Amino acid sequence: MPGNSVGIVYPQIMNFEEVLGLTSGAQLSKYEVAFETYGDLNETKSNAILVCHALNASHHVAGIYADDKKNIGWWDNLIGPGKPVDTNKFFVIGVNNLGGCHGTTGPASINPETGVEFGGDFPIITVEDWVEVQARLANRLGITKFFAVMGGSLGAMQALQWSISYPDRVQNAIVIAAAPKLSAQNIAFNEVARQAITTDPNYYGGHYYGKNVVPTKGLRIARMIGHITYLSDDAMAEKFGRDLRKDSLTFNFDVNFQIESYLRYQGDKFADSFDANTYLRITKALDYFDPAANHDGDLAAALSNVGGEFLIISFTSDWRFSPSRSHEIVKALIDNGKNVSYAEIDAPHGHDAFLMADARYHKIIRRYLERTRL
């Protein structure tokens, strides 16, 4: 068991039967949400921290499962007793987003209107929709205000949206490795990944469940494309360089270089555990996120009424969501007179740096959380 771990944890399911209206105009008459909690909620319910997950993660944020002790929470290095997000002090909640494939209602769930899986009929989801579902879960848990809402990458976009949608319910927003909207290049990467899935012969318009097939080839390629964008050139060079898998070139299209082997391994692993329909919808949510869209592109106007204080963190080697994108958020908040702290970490890991146990990065989060009284 990892040191200072929250230990064995158990996923929970909350069922909702009130209608959920989505940004797209679609509705879900009922749905369920998978989540996990760590630590204890205090009497005043003022110590809750919501952790929002990025693209390929889930509600399993910390700890291990009794039946699979190798399945460690994706942010376990940050969250636990005595860790920067200290579960001796805070009540931490991880939520699997709507449209997911880890317990929350998604494309593989049964559509109550048809009696078969939603498949390709599951609606498009947005960051705003996720925040609304998270708020409903908080209501059920009796939490009227979060001490903090935090996340990295797509999770950070949710933290930012929380401060917009529910300014009175967020005391602190911790926004890590984020952007106020995707660049054209980022949308392009996502589209290539989606095309890899939707052109797979086993995709069947998203209705592949009943055919007992999976668009594995497309999902593998999508993951390989995405993974390249999560790593920096320096990180790839240090870890793999141009190292060969064998002693010499094989002069064929099989694996020659170690980086090729690594990407194929990541693609295979991902395709075995993630749903292609979910991947399509999450990347669309990324593409659509743009708080300034309804304010003529003016981010300061979009953030004029946000609530709480902010910690914004970026990483120098993150070329997918570069520090300049965080600077946009910081400037918009400062223009509105908001209380914002900013840290730029010199780290070599690329976009994935927000998942790493970097001592400087962790110290910043620890100190930020310690400075604020519950």
Image (cartoon, helix red, strand yellow):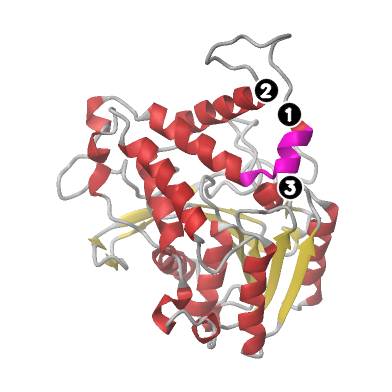
Counting residues from the start of the chain, the first of labels 1 and 3 encountered is 1
Find out whether residue 231 is within the magenta segment: yes
Q: Nearer the viewer, mark 1 or mark 3?
A: 1
Q: Amino acid at mark 3?
A: Met
Residue 52, compared with residue 110, is above or below; it is below
- In the image, 41 versus 2, the foreground residue is 2
- Please identify the residue farthest to the left as the structure is shown: 114
Task: Check disc 1: other Cα within 10 Å, few if <14, some if 14-19, many if 20+.
Answer: some
Q: Amino acid at mark 2?
A: Gln
Tell me where residue 40 sits by quadrant.
bottom right
**Residue 255, position in %: x, y?**
59, 17
Which residue has dot 1 on it?
240
Task: Check disc 2: other Cα within 10 Å, few if <14, some if 14-19, many if 20+.
Answer: some
Residue at figure coordinates x 22%, y 47% from the top left: 111
Quadrant position of the C terminus in the picture:
bottom right
Residue at mark 3 to residue at mark 2: CA–CA distance: 22 Å
In the rendered structure, are the residues bearing label 1 and label 3 in contact, judged by CB atoms less than 8 Å apart?
no
Secondary structure of the residue carrying tag 3 is: loop
- In the image, 199 versus 213, the foreground residue is 199
Which residue has dot 3 on it?
356
Residue 279, compared with residue 302, is above or below; it is above
Which residue has dot 2 on it?
258
Q: Which residues are magenta?
A: 230-238
